[in-house]
Every structure is written in C-alpha cells, then in structure tokens.
Amino acid sequence: MQYIGFIISLISLICTAQSSHPTNHAELNKQLFTHIYEHNSWGSQESRSGNGSTLTRTKTIRSQLPKLIAQLQITTILDAPCGDFNWMKTINLSTIDHYIGLDIVGSLIQKNNDLYGTSNREFHVSDIVNNPLPCVDLIICRDCVQHLTDHDVFKLFANIKRSKSRYLLLSNYPQSMENNDIDQIYSTARITYRNLLRAPFNFPEPLLVIDEGFDSKALTLWQIDDLPDF
C-alpha cells in the first residue's frame, strides 16, 4: 500500500507541475539534465549518464553493492537519480522486493520503463530536490550532489531525512579539503567535488566507504537518522 500511495502522490505532483510555474532552480535543472541526456553532452559511448556510469568505472561498486544489500538485509531501494540504468542493470536484484528509480529527465524514464520495468522495478519522473521521497531501506544517490548548488543540496538532504528511510549510499570526495558552491547556471560542466564530512555539511563518520578507484570518489554509507538536520 505504501508504494501505491507513492505512485498516486507522483501523479498528483506531475499534474500540479503542469498547471503551475516551477521554481527557477527546478526548471533550470530539468532543462539542463534533459539536454545532457538527449544530446549525450557528457560524451560517453556507453552511457548517456556519462563516463561515471560505464561498466569500467563502476566495477568496484558493482562488486560491493550486492554484498552490502545482503549484509544490511535491504529489501527496498530508491535509486535517485537513477540515470539510464546502465550499470545497475547488471546488479542481481532478485532479493529486492521493490526497486524505484527516479530521475528528472522524462525521456530517460520512459526508456528505462520500456527496457527494464517489471512488476517490482519501476521508474518515475521526479525532481528529487523538491518532490517527496518514499520510505525505503536504502537510498542510492550517486553522482548527483556534485552537480547541484549548495541551496539544492541542502534541500535534497532535508528531503532525504523527511523520507524516514534507513540508509543513504552517497557519492563523496573524501580528499577534498574545502567545499565550494557552484553557480546555478546552464552548463554541462557544472560540477564541484564536495567532501560532506566538512563544513557546511558536517556529516558524521560513515559506516562504510567504497573507493571507486576513479576521480578520488567514494560511494559512502550513512544511517539517515545520524545525519544532521538541514
């Protein structure tokens, strides 16, 4: 029933968005990431979500994620943003009761549903910064916050806490010595490498760090109840 309610909420949000003007941040993000996907602006020959979503770049996390799912007894996953599902499609999700992929790009979600949608694996268009998130065992938020402004990152983290989910698996750059904001501009090169353990985010020490082996990036696990309030 929880997931039926979530789907109804999504439909309501889509209808509301069609009849009102979105915020500037939300509209710019939607236009930017739609352009990147539809024009393959990040230039990967394998994944329109960029080189970070190729099978080579995700080799380590594809090896470690099934072990983590088993260890934490995860049965429900929210993958947000899910991107084009290029590497996740190789993960054995047979022990997962429900997988939900969210992304702001409508054409991407339509293709994901056509190619990968099943009775317990579904994809929805959603602005994860502003729209409510379902309560799940594990939220995966990979390769997202480095492309957002501080304003949107704070809103996203507050949204994640409001979901009452259990765990967050999030991209982090632990070698970064300071955190710099980025301008809310329409640019495919909009990126900043945040270390979430440092100010102004001040996350606690993580439960687990998976070094991805590229770009000094790590997929990092926290219990959501332990995160600061934003």
Image (cartoon, grey):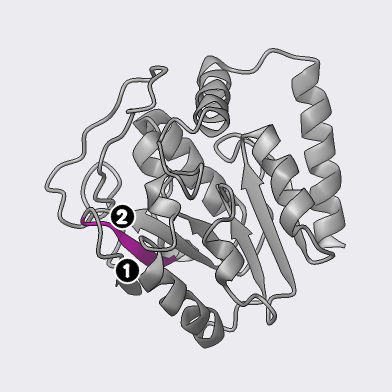
Task: Identify the element where label 2 is drawn.
Answer: strand
Q: Amino acid at mark 1?
A: Pro
Relative placement, left or right, of 16 versus 81 is right
Q: Main secondary structure of the magenta part?
A: strand
Location of residue 185 by image quarter: top left
Which residues, given as a range, are shown in magenta? 216-222
Task: Identify the element where label 1 is drawn.
Answer: loop
The residue tagged 1 is 206
Relative placement, left or right, of 176 versus 113 is left
Mark 1 Cα shell of 10 Å, populated few (<14), some (14-19), many (≥20): some
Please tell me whether mark 1 or mark 2 is closer to you in this view: 2
In the rendered image, residue 23, in percent from the top left (x then y), is placed at 58, 17
* Disc number for residue 25: none
Magenta stretch contains residue 219: yes
The residue tagged 2 is 172
Position above or below: 97 against 136: below
Position above or below: 142 against 127: below
Mark 2 Cα shell of 10 Å, populated few (<14), some (14-19), many (≥20): many
* Residue under the image location 39 percent in, 70 percent down: 59
User: Which of the two residues, 71 or 133, is positioned nearer the viewer here?
Assistant: 71
Assess whether mark 2 and mark 1 are in contact (beta carbons under 8 angstroms). yes
